[in-house]
Image (tube, rainbow, N blue to C red):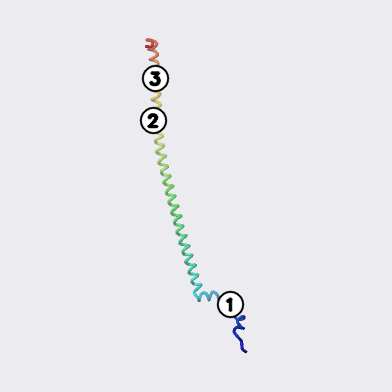
Amino acid sequence: MNINIIDALPYIAPILTAIGAYKWDWLMHKLNIKQKTADVEGTTLANLQKNLDIYQDMVTDLDKRYKDRIADFEQNFTEAMDRLRVEIDDLKKINSELEEMVNEQKDFISKQSKSLKYYESKFGKQ
């Protein structure tokens, strides 16, 4: 019985392919292909985690900065409002003093006008 390998190849190739598919993980591990793929995936995941950590730090820092800035604005607003209230009170006081002066001047003018009318009626216009 003389079997030629070329004649048997169509029967042997599918059997070897089936065995290879069945032992794929073992074969990849032996050839260090699976290990390298796992290392690349691990490195990718580590880089992704680092990027997420950096992003989280940026967001946290940005949040802190804006909260500080808002607190500064609130403090400045409160101080400005207090100063404005004091100025308004001062202006109200000045306004009431000016109103008193105007009333005094009106009274004085009224008295002067009466005196002038009295003297004009007594002595006539000159």
Instruction: Give the quarter of the figure containing the N terminus.
Output: bottom right
At mark 3, the secondary structure is: helix
Q: Earlier in the sequence, mark 2 or mark 1?
A: 1
Label 1, secondary structure: give it. helix
Q: Position of residue 19 (x, y in %)?
A: 58, 78
Residues at badges 1 and 3 in contact (C-beta under 8 Å)? no
Q: Position of residue 35 (x, y in %)?
A: 49, 72
Q: Which mark is residue 17?
A: 1
The crowd level at tag 2 (other Cα within 10 Å; few <14, some 14-19, many 20+) is few
**Residue at x 55% of width, y 75% of height:** 24
Classed neighbour count for the residue bearing mark 3: other residues with Cα under 10 Å, few (<14), some (14–19), many (≥20) = few
Query: In this figure, which residue is indicated by the disc labeled 2?
Result: 94
Looking at the image, is mark 2 or mark 1 nearer the viewer? 1
Taking the spot 38% from the left edge, 15% from the top edge, the residue there is 116
Task: Measure the C-alpha gap from mark 1 to mark 3.
Answer: 123 Å
Q: Earlier in the sequence, mark 2 or mark 3?
A: 2
Residue 74's place in the image compared with 120, above or below, is below
Three-letter amino acid code of the residue under disc 2: Ile
Q: Is residue 12 above or below residue 63?
A: below
Residue 103, located in which quarter of the rendered image? top left
Q: Amino acid at mark 1?
A: Thr
Mark 3, residue position: 109
